[in-house]
């Protein structure tokens, strides 16, 4: 699956142009595993503009419950909006909004309760990467966020090294492949049903480096920030994904 994370970008006019261009491109590509996470404000616009196409529209984040929580979007609002998936634990939420694993675990449980597909983002800092602590960090994030809870069959993990997000730096695709295998093993060994989740890579994916990632067996797709803001570039990446993983 390829997911666009638009973060706090977009406006009604440029979104319309994006969707029109994307629809034109998709008619020749025809991939079936595409997701878009626009801002909450633009969710209905994108859902409506892409309604005739097989594209999942989701949220970038969610709160754990509704009620007296000013500024929040609750899980039942998400259900009401008919969302297809929801990101949780993005490093920007962890860093800027001080979300810790305990809080992310509550979000995970809220999604599970409402049967919404969770995309759990995990990743290490550059310091942890340099110190060889990547796997330890990822294991701890997985354990604290989802282990001991119901593991949903449609759970997706997004491995996003913090130092690769928006920087133009990426780990080597072969190393990412090994890390993804590790992530799958950790989740599988905790899953009563022996589930092996899909694992997406995120962090400075573009149309030039995409083929090197998608050729790897355990890289099941990508979560894409900056490069998803241009409909042509995003379509190029989907075309590459489709060539490697859907044929
Ligand atoms: C992201 O923020 O999830 C991301 C992967 O961003 P970028 O592609 O811009 O590195």
Image (tube, grey):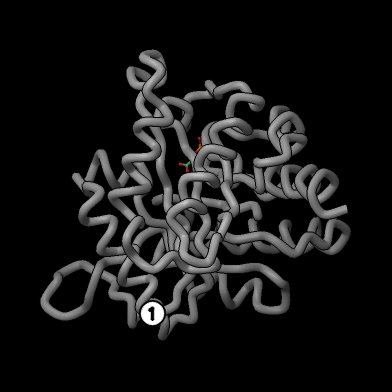
How many numbered circles are shown? 1
Q: Tell whether 82 sits left or right of 243.
A: left
Tell me: residue 176, above or below residue 13: above
Whether residue 158 appears in this view of the structure is: yes
Whether residue 229 appears in this view of the structure is: no
**Callout 1 environment at 10 Å: few (<14), some (14 to 19), or many (20+)?**
few
Question: Where is residue 235 drawn, in percent x and y?
Answer: 73, 49
Question: Where is residue 60 drawn, in percent x and y?
Answer: 41, 58
Tell me: residue 174, above or below residue 237: above
Q: Tell whether 28 sits left or right of 218.
A: right
Q: Tell whether 215 sits left or right of 63.
A: right
* Residue at screen point 65% across, 55% down: 1
Residue closest to the far left: 68
Q: Is mark 1 within 8 Å of ligand 1?
A: no
* Residue at screen point 29% across, 71% down: 73
Q: Give the secondary structure at mark 1.
A: loop
Question: Where is residue 115 drawn, in percent x and y?
Answer: 44, 77
Which is nearer the eye, 194 or 112? 194
Tell me: residue 245, above or below residue 182: below
Residue 213 found in image quarter: top right
Which is nearer the eye, 123 or 230? 123
Question: Where is residue 182 drawn, in percent x and y?
Answer: 53, 37
* Residue at screen point 41% across, 27% down: 134
Which is nearer the eye, 20 or 151? 151
* Residue at screen point 45% across, 73% down: 116
Residue closest to the far bottom: 80
Which is nearer the eye, 195 or 115? 195
Identify residue for label 1. Answer: 114
């Amino acid at each position: 699956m390829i997911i666009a994370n638009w973060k706090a970008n977009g406006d009604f006019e440029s979104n319309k142009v994006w969707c029109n261009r994307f629809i034109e491109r998709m008619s020749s590509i025809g991939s079936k595993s595409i997701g878009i996470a626009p801002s909450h404000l633009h969710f209905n616009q994108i859902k409506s503009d892409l309604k005739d196409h097989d594209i999942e529209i989701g949220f970038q984040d969610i709160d754990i419950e509704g009620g007296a929580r000013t500024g929040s979007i609750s899980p039942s609002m998400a259900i009401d909006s008919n969302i297809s998936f929801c990101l949780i634990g993005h490093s920007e939420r962890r860093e800027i909004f001080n979300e810790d694993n305990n809080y992310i675990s509550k979000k995970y449980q809220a999604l599970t309760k409402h049967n919404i597909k969770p995309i759990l983002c995990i990743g290490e800092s550059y310091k942890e990467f340099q110190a060889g602590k990547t796997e330890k960090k990822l294991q701890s994030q997985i354990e604290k966020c989802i282990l001991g809870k119901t593991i949903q069959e449609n759970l997706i993990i997004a491995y996003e090294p913090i130092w690769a997000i928006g920087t133009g730096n990426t780990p080597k695709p072969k190393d990412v492949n090994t890390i993804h295998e590790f992530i799958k093993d950790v989740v599988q060994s905790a899953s009563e049903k022996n589930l092996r989740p899909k694992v997406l890579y995120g962090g400075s994916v573009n149309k030039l480096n995409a083929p090197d990632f998608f050729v790897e067996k355990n890289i099941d797709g990508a979560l894409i920030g900056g490069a998803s803001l241009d409909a042509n570039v995003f379509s190029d990446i989907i075309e590459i994904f489709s060539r490697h993983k859907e044929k």
